[in-house]
Amino acid sequence: MYITLRPWTIDDVATLTEYYNNVNIWNNLRNYIPHPYTAVDAEKFINTQIEIFPTLNFAILNEDEIVGGIGITLLDDVYIMNVELGYWIAEPFWGQGIATIAVGLMTQYVFETFAINRIVAEVFDYNKASMRVLEKNGYYLESVRRKGILKNEFLYDDFVWVKQKLY
């Protein structure tokens, strides 16, 4: 297994569309990502990302195959020293340690590339595997927002994980 990150390209539209249409992936994503997810949605996302430098969102590759995605959102106002991390692994590749490696790579990239102090990742309470990925990468559980997430018409706890840059 050789995990790398690379910027999304327009050639990735079909793969991104296929993976995002898996309801088990979508159940762990924010609601602003449409479901069903169309090729037009994928094209719009990728075309937007191509214009951004430094890169904020990457495809996760195992060898040359896309197996997921990872990215950050730059925060502003009083949160300007923070970014929010998000990631997903396509279901056929769950349980192989790919997310752990990808989060490690992204964490290093973010701290080397952006003038920030903290990376924040929010995890829905039923996604224990994602919490373990963050823990393995040195993130700590900062808080739990009880019933802070509404997903699929149900309220869930929101686990907030953080990694701070050590100066």
Image (cartoon, rainbow, N blue to C red):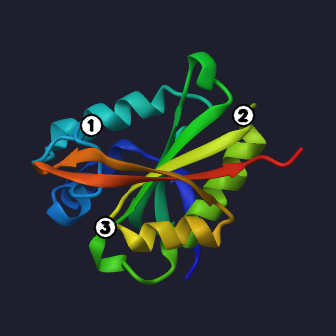
Would you call the spot at circle 2 few (<14 residues within 10 Å), some (14-19), or many (20 or more)? some
Left or right of 137? Residue 36 is left
Element on which disc 2 rests? loop
- Tell me which residue sits at (71%, 34%) in the image: 114
Residue farthest top in this picture? 77
What is the quadrant of residue 138 in the picture? Answer: bottom right
Left or right of 162? Residue 166 is right
Element on which disc 3 rests? loop
What is the quadrant of residue 161 in the picture? Answer: bottom right
Real-space CA distance between mark 1 and mark 2, rounded to the nearest whole angstrom = 29 Å
Q: Nearer the viewer, mark 3 or mark 1?
A: 3
Asked whether the viewer can see residue 62, the reply is no
Q: Which mark is residue 126?
A: 3
Q: Position of residue 40 (x, y in %)?
A: 17, 36
Q: Which mark is residue 116?
A: 2
Q: Nearer the viewer, residue 83 or 44?
A: 83
- Tell me which residue sits at (48%, 61%) in the image: 60
Q: Which part of the image, by quadrant, shows the N terminus?
A: bottom right
Check contact, mark 1 vs mark 2: CB within 8 A: no
Q: Nearer the viewer, mark 1 or mark 2?
A: 2
Left or right of 70? Residue 105 is right
Say which residue label 1 marks. Answer: 43
Q: Amino acid at mark 1?
A: Glu
Q: Amino acid at mark 3?
A: Tyr
Would you call the spot at circle 1 few (<14 residues within 10 Å), some (14-19), or many (20 or more)? some
Q: Position of residue 74 (x, y in %)?
A: 55, 30
Element on which disc 1 rests? helix
Upstream in the sequence, badge 3 or badge 2? 2
Real-space CA distance between mark 3 and mark 1, rounded to the nearest whole angstrom = 30 Å
Upstream in the sequence, badge 1 or badge 2? 1
Q: Position of residue 77 (x, y in %)?
A: 58, 16
Check contact, mark 3 vs mark 1: CB within 8 A: no
